[in-house]
Image: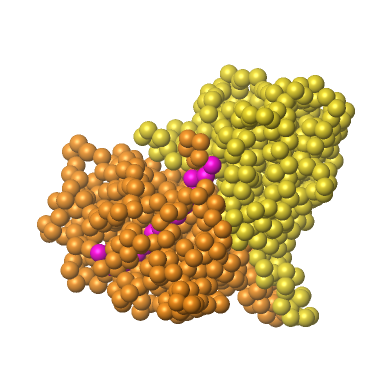
Chain colours: A yellow, B orange
């Protein structure tokens, strides 16, 4: 499933083959065409592509990031005549039934706009539970100890409307119409049982716009996500829970969702050299200041006249792992929302990470960044949430079933 | 520039050739490949494609609709030591300078994120002036009489935050990162001179997802925009102003921007047959209820046992032109925004139309719809604005120059 080279680029995947890599497409198409006429796989467009729903893990994590994402956190509504545990089970049954269809290009049960469901464009639906919900459903003893709220960092300026949530729904696809339709279906079917707490829409470069496989850029113009997990072994080591503490959670993971506002007005006031020193990378190609290419290893010891080439308080110097544990999957999206009150821009990053244990993997890195990152002057974390991402299921099961049907 | 068949589909354009029509791409690529190796035009992805900036008309009107749009209305700020007329001229000079570069994949002047500018993905920037601004800049006598506020219709539920504006900026591209960057550049450069009054983000199906050239679908699941202007003669007749009343306005047009909320919760309660009777078209392929295919002519006289097959109060029966004048270009985008106050969904249509004279072309149709459209129960117009869309310019001129440098 994860097919990336050690340098963090996908070596073989459907996306580059079918659309991203138009040259690859044309190449295979040419073979087909020379040999036996028109290429069927090319005619349909990428809308026809489907990501698997069933499996050991949920989709939308190791899945090569789609162009569009909608993340919604929901809170349980008090229900008459139904326990919170039964409510969560009812929601997860519905979401499983709907997502298992929608991701495969089939309308949801009682889908009122079935025509919007036929081209899934690699739709994935990823579901998680907030730490507090385990208490609420009477299963506190089954909460993975790793799914716990983060400490607040000194640079956080958290706004309650972007924090927390009982349930997480992450919906990703390469087509914004698909994301909107899936969001509509999944949210309306549970509206009597849960309210939307926050909702964040994000995007990356459009699929097919740049088939070079380049790392995405954020709205500050930086290449974002160069250092990332790359192969199945790294996912096994750093992302997937193995059920050692909570057996039901094997195949799950823990998501951290941070909303990081870019202070574009002040960022745009500094010159390129200052920006590059704050990041520790070149803006044009993302290469570390000690290198030539994006995936060159930064040399944090290099100096000129005793002055480090990469400043020790640069983002790259502080964000790099200092132990084997300090690694996690980055799966961020840009946001660009209507600004409020006289601002020009409200944009930034929906920084989504996946890891087995945020306390050991994410927190030490974030603590270093909070303490000293030169970039802090131009970024502000205004939202933060943690969710236990449920293990994948097989056909016939529903997401969370192993948890909810445990003897309690 | 306009290359559509009489049935409203593009017959030849860059989009279908390069990406939309993957089969066409593969076909031409195959020829290239069989003959002389890899196809260069395919390798770059559609990000490299640029729409012309200079010309008789602005881009973003006859341009085949891009996947993403940002529409922003701005109001002039009072300026010390500068007349409103000079302020408008300063804004239009800046936007011309920036848009003429950005649309061609070149960074704007003093672009602080130049790396986000290199792949324009068919970026267009379209600029208009609200009716009231002509008074404010002392050029009321030069306002096209056609650029005047619409009457309020009985079904309108207009919310001031979605109405009006001194200036319109419509930014469209096939890549949301490009739209966000262009919006940032164009808005920040004028922030001392104008405030954002409203801002609407819209989308259609992702480019490359469905290369069939199908008409877009709205969030209610309907094929939307079947009846549309198709060839250059129709654009000349119905869209482009010829300067008969205001010579400076030759090559311009008038835009109507309506924000139409879809009442999804009640829409989803009715069955498919009721939906199809309200629209007058089949939901699956958009064919009129009297036809088989989307572009079949509706037969408004057909009846079964004396009951019309297409109800006379259906959307299609009322929206169809009843005179040669009642035609205009529809260039709508879907929206799907965070809902407020307990709602499940806030989605609908940013209904953008272009016509020479809304009073003769748009208003009679809208009046009929307001009076009787069966669909009114499930749609609500909450925003409405009119803008005089400036004529195109040649290199060396700025948008609006012919107006602003008129002897007053």
Above or below residue A207? Residue A60 is above
In the depicted view, which residue is nearer to us: A74 or A4? A74
Task: Decide whether residue B174 is among the magenta residues.
Answer: no
Above or below residue B365? Residue B125 is above
Residue at 35 percent of width and 69 percent of height: B328
Whole-percent x, y for residue B172 in the image: 45, 57
- Which quadrant, please, contains the N terminus of chain B? bottom left
The reply to whether residue B186 is in sight is no
In the depicted view, which residue is nearer to us: B78 or B196? B196
Whole-percent x, y for residue B24 in the image: 62, 75
Whole-percent x, y for residue B12 in the image: 51, 77
Left or right of A92? Residue A153 is left
Task: Decide whether residue B348 is among the magenta residues.
Answer: yes
Whole-percent x, y for residue B25 in the image: 63, 73
Range covered by the magenta-colored residues: B344-359
Number of on-image labels: 0
Left or right of B82? Residue B63 is right
| Residue found at the very far left of the displayed protein | B408
Q: Main secondary structure of the magenta part?
A: strand
In the depicted view, which residue is nearer to us: B71 or A365? B71
- Which quadrant, please, contains the C terminus of chain B? bottom left
Left or right of B365? Residue A373 is right
Residue at 51 percent of width and 53 percent of height: B267
Residue at 72 percent of width and 32 percent of height: A86
Above or below residue A251? Residue B50 is below
The reply to whether residue B281 is in sight is yes
* Picture quadrant where residue A130 is located: top right
Residue at 20 percent of width and 36 percent of height: B80
Above or below residue A272? Residue A53 is below
């Amino acid at each position: 499933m994860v097919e990336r080279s050690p340098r963090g680029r996908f070596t073989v995947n459907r996306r580059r083959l079918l659309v991203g890599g138009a040259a690859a497409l044309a190449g295979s198409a040419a073979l087909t065409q020379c040999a036996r006429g028109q290429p069927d796989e090319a005619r349909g467009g990428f809308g026809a592509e489907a990501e698997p729903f069933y499996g050991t893990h949920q989709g939308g994590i190791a899945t090569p990031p789609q162009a569009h994402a909608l993340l919604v956190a929901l809170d349980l509504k008090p229900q008459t005549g139904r326990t919170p545990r039964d409510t969560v089970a009812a929601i997860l049954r519905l979401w499983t039934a709907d997502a298992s269809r929608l991701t495969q290009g089939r309308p949801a049960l009682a889908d009122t706009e079935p025509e919007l469901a036929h081209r899934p464009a690699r739709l994935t639906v990823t579901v998680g539970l907030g730490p507090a919900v385990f208490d609420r459903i009477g299963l506190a003893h089954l909460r993975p100890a790793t799914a716990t709220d983060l400490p607040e960092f000194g640079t956080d300026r958290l706004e309650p409307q972007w924090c927390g949530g009982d349930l997480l729904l992450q919906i990703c696809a390469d087509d914004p119409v698909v994301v909107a339709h899936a969001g509509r279906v999944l949210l309306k079917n549970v509206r009597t049982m849960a309210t939307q707490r926050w909702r964040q829409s994000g995007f990356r470069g459009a699929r097919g716009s740049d088939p070079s496989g380049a790392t995405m850029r954020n709205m500050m113009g930086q290449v974002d996500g160069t250092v990332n997990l790359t192969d199945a072994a790294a996912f096994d080591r750093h992302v997937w829970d193995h059920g050692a503490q909570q057996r039901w959670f094997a195949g799950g993971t823990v998501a951290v969702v941070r909303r990081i506002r870019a202070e574009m007005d002040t960022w745009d006031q500094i010159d390129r050299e200052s920006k590059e020193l704050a990041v520790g990378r070149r803006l044009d190609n993302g290469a570390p200041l000690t290198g030539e290419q994006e995936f060159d290893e930064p040399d944090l010891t290099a100096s000129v006249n005793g002055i480090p080439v990469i400043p020790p308080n640069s983002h790259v110097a502080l964000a790099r792992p200092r132990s084997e544990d300090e690694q996690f999957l980055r799966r961020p999206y840009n946001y660009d929302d209507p600004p409020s009150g006289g601002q020009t821009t409200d944009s930034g990053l929906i920084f989504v990470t996946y890891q087995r244990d945020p306390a050991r993997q994410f927190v030490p890195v974030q603590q270093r960044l909070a303490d000293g990152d030169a970039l802090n002057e131009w970024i502000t974390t205004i939202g933060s949430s943690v969710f236990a991402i449920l293990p994948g299921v097989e056909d016939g099961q529903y997401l969370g079933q192993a948890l909810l049907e445990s003897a309690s």
